[in-house]
Image (tube, grey):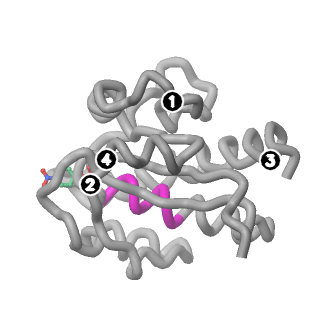
Amino acid sequence: MTPPTVNVLFVCLGNICRSPTAHGVFQALVDARNLGAAIGVDSAGTGAWHIGNPPDRRATFAARRRGYDLSPLRARQASAADFLAFDYILAMDRDNLRVLESMKPSTYAGELDLLLRYCGEPDLLDVPDPYYGGGDGFEHVLDLVEAAGAALLDRIVERHRL
Ligand code: 4NP
């Protein structure tokens, strides 16, 4: 099988709440448009605490209520090799973007940015970390990544003529 044309990586801190949610939502958007062969999707964390773990139960339940299955996902840590494999590396907040900027090889020709840039609202930059908060934090994450994910997919389809 030929590898995907475009590879997209979502990155948060733990890779158990926000970025797996973005991963599952974006994969569903890609699949709904039959673009699974053209667009590869993955997620990672800048931190190492949760390597190998499934997403947080609260993220999995909230996503399931909207029809997304996060259960096969397992946390991994972002690494320099990701800059060779991914055309889009999208951080869930500015703290994680800063970490990724410090890892980025000078030769990286892809796009390293905040996911919420795709929302088109200049003041909306960070997907708030729901880990220590209440249940509705996970609904808010879903609202944000559904909106940004749809805009991101439109942009990729247009730019790469998919
Ligand atoms: P995430 O949330 O970055 O959205 O996966 C977090 C999960 C775990 C921790 C921090 C944030 N933690 O400190 O363990």
Rendered location of residue 22, percent (x, y) = 48, 56
Q: Start and end of the magenta stretch?
A: 17-24
Q: Which residue is mark 1?
A: 108
Indicate which disc, 4 or 1, sits on the residue closer to the N terminus: 4
Q: In the image shown, does 81 or 89 lie closer to the viewer?
A: 81
Tag on residue 77?
2
Q: Nearer the viewer, residue 120 or 54?
A: 54
Q: Calculate the distance from the C-alpha at mark 1 to the C-alpha at mark 2.
A: 19 Å
148 relative to 143, above or below: above
Q: Position of residue 4 (x, y in %)?
A: 68, 61
Kindly report the distance in space between the C-alpha atoms of the residues bearing marks 4 and 3: 27 Å
Q: Mark 3 and mark 1: span between their CA atoms?
A: 21 Å
For this rendering, which residue is in front, 7 or 20? 7
Decide: is 31 above or below 5: below
Q: What residue is drawn where x is 41% and y is 38%?
A: 91
Q: CA distance from mark 3 to mark 2?
A: 28 Å
Check disc 3 and report the residue beneath it. 157
